[in-house]
Image: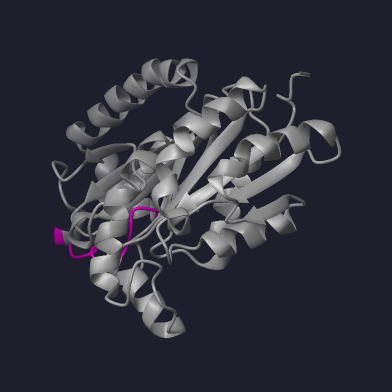
Amino acid sequence: MKNQRGRKLFIITGISGAGKSQALKCFEDFGFTCVDNLPIALLDHFAELLAERPGMSRVALGIDIREGKFLKDLEAALAVVRAKGFEYRILFLDSSDRAIVQRFSETRHRHPLGTNIVEAVREERKILTDIKAIADKVIDTSSMTLGELKETLSMALELQGTKEMNLSVVSFGYKFGLPLDADLVVDVRFMPNPNYVPSLKRKNGLARAVQTYLLRQPSATKFLRDFSGMLRSVLPHYIHEGKSYLTIAVGCTGGHHRSVFVTHSLARELQKEGYSVREFHRDIHR
């Protein structure tokens, strides 16, 4: 069979209520042929169809908990697809329990696993654990707008640059919980806190005054130098292992000062290295 590696095949999956349907609509806007809830048993036949139709070079498939017991067959089915010469990427959409419960309450939709949403989500997470583990990219949509989701998906679609990896650097506050999609998490609460400096309390880590304050702290400058160096040394190994997306989460207490400053600094350094980088400050306005 002719090698199909020039094609783009995305598997969109994740927790119910995390935005899979919206993600598929975004892919349609990007010019993809989208198929929602394709039975896993038909993946092999669908790959044969794609092979016979060269015009179908950009395809996104939605697969979720509605597949029930057949979800356990997904990894084996995808192995068959890859054996036929197709490269694919799995995007897993996740969201906090609170956000999912709110979304189901607002839409009044029934969860596929039952009417008790909290218990249904807990059970769904258990069922999807293995699929989440093999995903190329986990996207936390808890606080995302539709525009931000579309931007994140757009990054996933970009042709790989010289570094062959898309990076996201995210600042967050520990008081609001860890980002669900983090691959690497670093805690910068060891740095002096600008929150206790009256003139800096109302500013954030993007403000020049806050950056100047932190750059005067030996612990901050040494960390930036050492951590940036570590990333430069390990990222090529992630790429060698086939990882296309990596999310680095930087946390401080509230997500306003130290984590924002470090995230902004890291994003700039990685961009200088030629990586495609998305900078996002989750809790900066809380």
Q: Is residue 146 left or right of residue 114?
A: right
The answer to whether residue 88 is seen in the rendering is: yes
Reply yes or no: does residue 37 show up in magenta. Answer: no
Q: Is residue 52 left or right of residue 255?
A: right
Identify whether 4 is placed above or below 98.
Answer: above
Q: Which residues are magenta?
A: 196-206
Give the main secondary structure, helix, strand or loop, of the magenta stretch.
loop
Point 49% across, 51% down: residue: 13
Point 32% across, 20% down: residue: 230
Q: Position of residue 30 (x, y in %)?
A: 73, 52
Q: Nearer the viewer, residue 284 or 34?
A: 34
Identify whether 12 is placed above or below 79.
Answer: below
Q: Quadrant of residue 57?
A: top right
Q: Nearer the viewer, residue 246 or 52?
A: 52
Reply yes or no: does residue 203 show up in magenta. Answer: yes
Identify whether 4 is placed above or below 118.
Answer: above
Q: Position of residue 48 (x, y in %)?
A: 73, 33
The answer to whether residue 179 is seen in the rendering is: no
Point 43% across, 56% down: residue: 65
Q: Position of residue 219 (x, y in %)?
A: 18, 33
Q: Is residue 187 left or right of residue 129?
A: left
Q: Position of residue 31 (x, y in %)?
A: 77, 52
Identify whether 102 is placed above or below 232.
Answer: below
